Image (tube, helix red, strand yellow):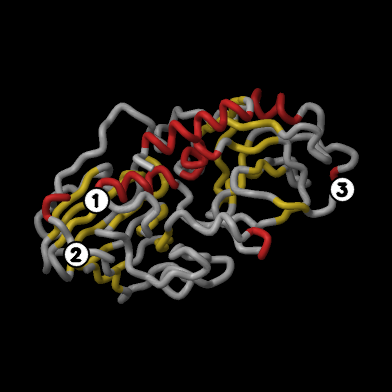
């Protein structure tokens, strides 16, 4: 349906990932902003976790090969139909016509945009998922980002009735620059300094330019190291874990994070809030709020329901 004329800065096929294969060393992967992925899919009546295209920072340009319907969610990349300048808003589904081109520009709000096709993007399933695993070089389209000349085909035939849908405004918005990041403290975490949680809450953090699909470094205070930090044995970690390396600058792990790590972990970001850190561009502020495990579970249920999952 779509022929790639320009791939964008980093565009990969992603679904909800491979969360059950960490014991094999396979990253959880999948969409960094799972909420926006699910919204894009629901706009087309897809299953919430159907494979879609995740574009980061700068979107791609695509020739429409067959008239059909697409849906867009997440960051605003000023998407337009090149031929007539028609805007393609985020949080909506759109009818696009064969012979035209659609272009996604640089982000103006947020960081990652999701482009859904009817039924999902048709790529082979690998280890239970169609998502691109960049660290492993498999899944998606040959385990790599999009390149010029690739083609994205939908799983299902397009339904014109799916065009013109809009996601209700006023609810959760992971691209909101004022959204806070909730985390749960790790009780008696090995190597964690006693003041670490207090500093996480009390510091005005900004997102470092050092960030990718594996993790986001936070600039602000330098978290002190516990005496035992240098003697830690690597252990399992997961997306959302807040690692404190020797530099003292915390790193929030994201979808492509490794499955083990040897740094102290003073807390874990609530899974419901991972879309927030995934959508926060470099240089923007990020406020951390400490909550309990029960609150985090409730937030996860509510957030998934809000995306139609």
Q: Residue at x 13, y 52 (%)?
A: 85
Q: Residue 200: x, y in percent?
A: 67, 29
Q: Is there CB contact under 8 Å for labels 3 and 1?
A: no
**Residue 44 disc label:** 1
**Residue 230 disc label:** 3
Specify whether 118 is left or right of 160.
Answer: right
Q: Residue at x 11, y 55 (%)?
A: 160
Q: Quadrant where the C terminus lies? A: top left
Query: Label 1's element?
Result: loop
Q: Crowdedness of circle 2 by 10 Å Cα count: few (<14), some, many (20+)?
A: few
In the depicted structure, whether residue 205 falls above or below residue 156? above
Residue 24 occupies quadrant: bottom right
List the residue tagged with mark 2. Answer: 157
Q: Nearer the viewer, mark 3 or mark 2?
A: 2
Q: CA distance from mark 3 to mark 2?
A: 56 Å
Q: Is there CB contact under 8 Å for labels 3 and 2?
A: no
Query: Label 2's element?
Result: loop
Specify whether 131 is left or right of 7.
Answer: right
- Please report whichever mark, 3 or 2, sits nearer to the chain's N-terminal start: 2
Q: Quadrant where the N terminus lies? A: bottom left
Q: Residue at x 40, y 52 (%)?
A: 57
Q: Crowdedness of circle 3 by 10 Å Cα count: few (<14), some, many (20+)?
A: some
């Amino acid at each position: 349906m779509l022929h790639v004329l320009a791939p964008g800065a980093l565009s990969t096929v992603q679904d909800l990932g491979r969360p059950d294969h960490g014991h094999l060393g396979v990253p959880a992967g999948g969409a960094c902003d799972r909420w926006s992925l699910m919204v894009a899919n629901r706009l087309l009546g897809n299953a919430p976790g159907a494979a879609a295209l995740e574009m980061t920072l700068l979107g791609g340009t695509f020739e429409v090969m067959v008239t059909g319907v697409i849906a867009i969610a997440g960051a605003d990349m000023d998407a337009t139909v090149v031929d007539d300048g028609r805007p393609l808003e985020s949080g909506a589904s759109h009818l696009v016509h064969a012979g035209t081109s659609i272009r996604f520009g640089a982000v103006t709000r947020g960081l990652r945009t999701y482009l859904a096709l009817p039924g999902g993007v048709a790529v082979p399933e690998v280890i239970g998922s169609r998502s691109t695993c960049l660290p492993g070089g498999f899944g998606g389209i040959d385990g790599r980002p999009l390149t010029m000349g690739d083609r994205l085909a939908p799983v299902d035939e397009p339904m014109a009735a799916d065009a013109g849908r809009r996601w209700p405004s006023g609810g959760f918005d992971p691209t909101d620059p004022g959204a806070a990041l909730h985390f749960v403290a790790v009780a008696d975490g090995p190597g964690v300094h006693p003041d670490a949680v207090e500093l996480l809450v009390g510091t005005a953090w900004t997102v470092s330019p050092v960030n990718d699909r594996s993790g986001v470094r936070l600039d602000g205070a330098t978290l002190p190291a516990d005496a035992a930090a240098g003697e830690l044995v690597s252990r399992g970690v997961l997306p959302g874990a807040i690692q404190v390396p020797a530099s003292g600058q915390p790193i929030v792990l994201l979808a492509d994070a490794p499955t083990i790590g040897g740094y102290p972990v003073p807390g874990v970001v609530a899974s419901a809030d991972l879309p927030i850190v995934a959508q926060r561009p470099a240089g923007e502020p990020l406020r951390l709020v400490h909550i309990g495990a029960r609150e985090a579970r409730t937030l996860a249920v509510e957030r998934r329901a809000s995306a139609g999952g």
